[in-house]
Image (cartoon, rainbow, N blue to C red):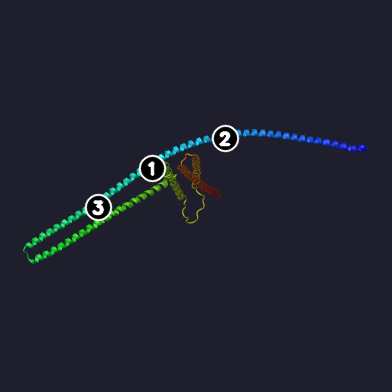
Amino acid sequence: MALIFLAGPLYATDRKSSSSDDRRVQDYKRKIAEINQRVAATEKALGQAAADYKAQVARKEKELRDLTQQYQARAESAKKAIGELRKDQAELAKALGNYEKALKEKQAAEANRKRDEAKKKAAEDAKRAADAKRAAAKKEADDRQRREAAKKKEEARRAAHTKKPAAKKPEQSKSDKQKRIDAARAKQRAEYAKRAAEAKARAGKARKDHDARSTEQREAIRKKAEESRRAFLKRFDVNRDGKVTKEEGKQVLAAEAKRRAEARNKASTSKSTSKPAPTRKAPVRKPAPKTSLDRLRAKYSAAIKNDESAKRRLATAKRAYDEARGNRKTYKVDLERLGKNYERARKDAYTAGRELVSAKRAYEYARKKQSEAKKR
């Protein structure tokens, strides 16, 4: 029995050790199986990654080919656009060269014309001066001849008097008379010479003043013409492009006629609605006349039409400006002009909207007053 009790634990220990070894084997096997599963999963993941890599490489290559084709298409389009722009640039350069050439020819012709006019004027001035000088010399020669003839005549007369045996007293009286005559003639000749010198000086001064006045007059005429041109452009140039067309002229004249008609209607309405001053008692308060309400209604309707027209013009100008901004072939000058037209249309639309609001407020106020008057 004692042996049994002693051997029991030993046998029990041997069985436990064997089962423990079996568990370890199972653990090892289980771990090996797990590692094999992980290896298989890793290999599967590696195969999937390789497949994904190949698919992604194929997709990237396809995208690269597409991008290459897009780039080539864009490059061809850009080259074509650049060629067209270069062509336009060459045409503009050619047109600019022709215009500059024509402008230089025009300026040269204008300079030649001015130079010819200056030469012609100088020749005319010289001719007038030479004529005046010849006239003065001729007049002086004539005066000298007259003086010499008078002197010779006087000497002949004196010689004839000396030959005659006459009494002393009459000869003395004739000598005194002749002296007075000679003194008067000398004084007259001096006055003639003085007047001729003064006339010559006045002629020279008048000629200089005339030249100066003609230059000033030409400058004044040029300034007046420039002011008139600016006023004309300010009045008729609607789009402010420096040119006046028939449509713009008709539009401005129609607008002015409309304003004058409105002013006449307003004046006639104010005259018709004016009341005489009270004499004895205050007049009875009466409702607003129907004509005033009709006029306000017509003004309100016209304001609605103007507002709609201004909005349409604004939409058209905005659409044209946006299209010009999106078009690469649009020139800068055209873009600036369309931008100015758009800004002007926007201001006109704003003004028309304000006028519509004012007309609507006035019409509603007048209608309210009329209804209140009818109730009373």
Judging by the rendered image, the residue that carries numbered circle 3 is: 129
Residue type at mark 3 is Ala
Seen from the viewer's position, the closer of residues 178 and 248 is 178
Residue density around tag 1, few if under 14, some if 14–19, many if 20 or more, within 10 Å = few
Please, is residue 87 above or below residue 200 in the view? above
Disc 1 element: helix
Disc 3 element: helix
- In the displayed structure, does residue 161 sit left or right of residue 246? left
As measured in the structure, the alpha-carbon distance from the residue carrying label 2 to the one carrying label 3 is 93 Å
As measured in the structure, the alpha-carbon distance from the residue carrying label 1 to the one carrying label 3 is 42 Å
* Mark number displayed over residue 100: 1
As measured in the structure, the alpha-carbon distance from the residue carrying label 1 to the one carrying label 2 is 51 Å
Residue type at mark 1 is Glu
Q: Picture coordinates of residue 145 (x, y %)?
A: 16, 56
Seen from the viewer's position, the closer of residues 225 and 10 is 10
Q: Residue at x 28, y 48 (%)?
A: 119
Seen from the viewer's position, the closer of residues 249 and 374 is 249
Residue type at mark 2 is Leu
Q: Picture coordinates of residue 274 (x, y %)?
A: 46, 51
Whichever of callouts 1 and 3 sits on the residue coming sooner in the sequence is 1
Do callouts 2 and 3 mark residues in contact (Cβ within 8 Å)?
A: no
Please, is residue 165 above or below residue 32 in the view? below
**What number of labels is visible?**
3
Q: Which of marks 1 and 3 is in front?
A: 1
Whichever of callouts 1 and 2 sits on the residue coming sooner in the sequence is 2
* Mark number displayed over residue 189: none
Please, is residue 348 above or below residue 152 in the view? above
Q: Residue at x 58, y 34 (%)?
A: 61
Disc 2 element: helix
Please, is residue 166 above or below residue 244 in the view? below
Judging by the rendered image, the residue that carries numbered circle 2 is: 64
